[in-house]
Image (tube, coloured by chain):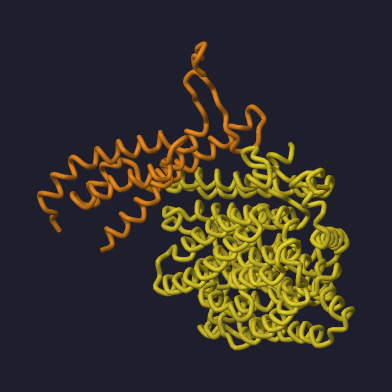
Amino acid sequence: MKSSLIVRAATRLLVGLLLMFSIWMLLRGHNEPGGGFIGGLIAATGFILYAIAHGCRAAREALRLEPQTIAMVGLGVALAAGAFAAIPGDALFTGQWLFLWPGPDTKGIPISNILVFDIGVYLVVMGSVLTLVLALEEEV
Amino acid sequence: MSATWLLPLPIVLPFATAVLAFLFRRGPEGRWISVFGSAVTLFLGVLLLIEVLSYGPQAAQMGEWPAPFGITLVADTLSAVMVVITGITGLAVAVYAVAEIDGDMEELGYHALFQVLIAGVSGAFLTGDLFNLYVWFEVMLISSFGLLVLGGKRVQLDAGIKYVTLNLVSTILFLSGIGLLYGTTGTLNLADLSRIAPTVDPGLMTVIAMMFMVGFGVKAAVFPLFFWLPASYHTPSFAVSAVFAGLLTKVGVYAMMRMFTLVFTQDIAFTHTILLWVACLTMVTGVLGAAAQTDFRRILSFHIISQIGYMVLGLALMTPLALMGGVFYLVHHIIVKANLFLVSGVANRIAGATELGHIGGLYKGAPLLAFLFLIPAFSLAGFPPLSGFWAKYVLVKASMDLQLWVVAFTALAVGLMTIYSMTKIWGQAFWKPHPGGTVPSLSTLRPGERMALLTPIGALALMTVLIGLFPEPFVLVAERAAGELLDPSAYIAAVLGEEEILQ
């Protein structure tokens, strides 16, 4: 089945936008609505749109990795972020913060394992949704 | 190692193993990662049990958010024992899977799904938070659905759909129950619930308790909610059905034991009387269903249901002796049941089928397998001196102490009928000559495969014999678990701290 020219032209524009939006969602998630889960869903939407316009094979090629692998690596990243709390001796999944270059009136740039955990969630959600959708799409 | 890390590790480690096993799924490394990870998980479970036995119930707050606000993991004796048994079953099945699971299933991620299932089961045993328990149930449901349909045969998909549909009904009831409970009490931490529950309107609590009873009842496959179990357990690969048979329904029984001793104790006369009749009917229907079946695994599936009845009976009677019997039965049953499914897998491998009419001659061709079948089969029926004898003895004694003669008689009669179906398997699969005229023999297996298939069966059978011959330490641990269930003050103190309770 060949999709219409309008879908393909719009996809070219929208996929990039959706992927960027998903990362923006992921990053704003710490203090405002957003986060890894919703970010992963939006990223998956981008690839699903691409699959509708250009077919599943093209979408798999664009992904480069298998979606299952992305999901499992994400699970590993999230676990590692949680287990990182062992190094300072805190309980599993305790937030760890590092502030880079603190100034006299600013706390500095915050770096935390919470963001790493969220990135893991992002990959898990994106990978598992794409696994399901691509499998279903190929079946039909 | 402190409790802060000893508690989450039996959950974290299977997850980590799943990730590694998945990344190496195309080669033979994946299955060895799974075996190694299962061995370490078992070791960590044993460490946890030792810690709990020496220092009493342990609690850990994830992310250092204090209870009742964050997610709490708690291990009392029952939880720790269940984690160890999960580790034992996990390791036995992981070794067995080395010989049974073929490359195609491995490539689809069998080992990863299996490890996630183990993580879900351990999580359900360790969590001290009701919503977290729901999450672990979902983890188990998703991974078990994946394992159930892996292979993609028509009968498997049929079973998978029945399994998921009925389990989702249970999940919805469970989730609605959680919502109502949160609305009435304002907390979902189990220890906190146990403190607040007596102050809430008892009528409302009983309604919520019944929702949980039905929800967990589907998971545990009690009468009349067991239909999904015999419809699905005979379809997946043997390693998968062994771990399902051993562990999955028992999580439902565990959840019931936890909730109906810790939280829903306002109207025992009502709730536990229902449980008592449910237990008796479950025992009887399960064993009658088994008598009507002619497939190795279907007979065993129906026996799971009748055995669940015994465990629920232990909970329903609510005396220290009965609960001790229930816990003992839980442990004995997981080992025996998983083992019988593993034996059925070997029988299928060398004799060619699980339908009893199509196989035979196993006693003549594979006497070792016949011997290894007899141990768990006799134990299941309650022959002395095997583990099942003590488990049944304690429960019958407990019902006689309460002068519930009908219940005691049912328990004994069901044991007798269990022997009937075990004899049917014995007579048909082992004694009768093979209808094809061949003599099935273990020597048709490659030596490496033979090791991987028979070692876990032998080890589990040895455990059954050991529990039977030296029941005392096991009885003592079960007694302690029952004591902690009946008097949860140590559990609550471990979660909330001593001062909190005095307020």
Residue at image position (64%, 55%) is B186
Residue at image position (48%, 43%) is A75
Residue at image position (24%, 38%) is A16
State the residue lying farthest toward the top.
A104
The answer to whether residue B269 is visible is: yes
Q: Which chain is orange?
A: A
Name the residue nearer the viewer: B356 or B88. B88
> How far across and down, in percent of the image, does residue B269 sit?
78, 76
Q: Quadrant of the N terminus of chain A?
A: bottom left
Residue B357: quarter of image: bottom right
The answer to whether residue B343 is visible is: no
> How far across and down, in percent of the image, does residue B47 sit?
75, 45
Name the residue nearer the viewer: A80 or B375. A80
Name the residue nearer the viewer: A16 or B250. A16
Q: Quadrant of the C terminus of chain A?
A: bottom left
* Image position of B376 with respect to A95: above or below: below
In-image side of B325 versus B210 (left or right): right
Residue at image position (60%, 64%) is B248
* Image position of B464 with respect to B293: above or below: above
> How far across and down, in percent of the image, does residue B378 sit?
75, 76
Q: Which chain is yellow?
A: B
> How far across and down, in percent of the image, does residue A62 sit?
26, 41
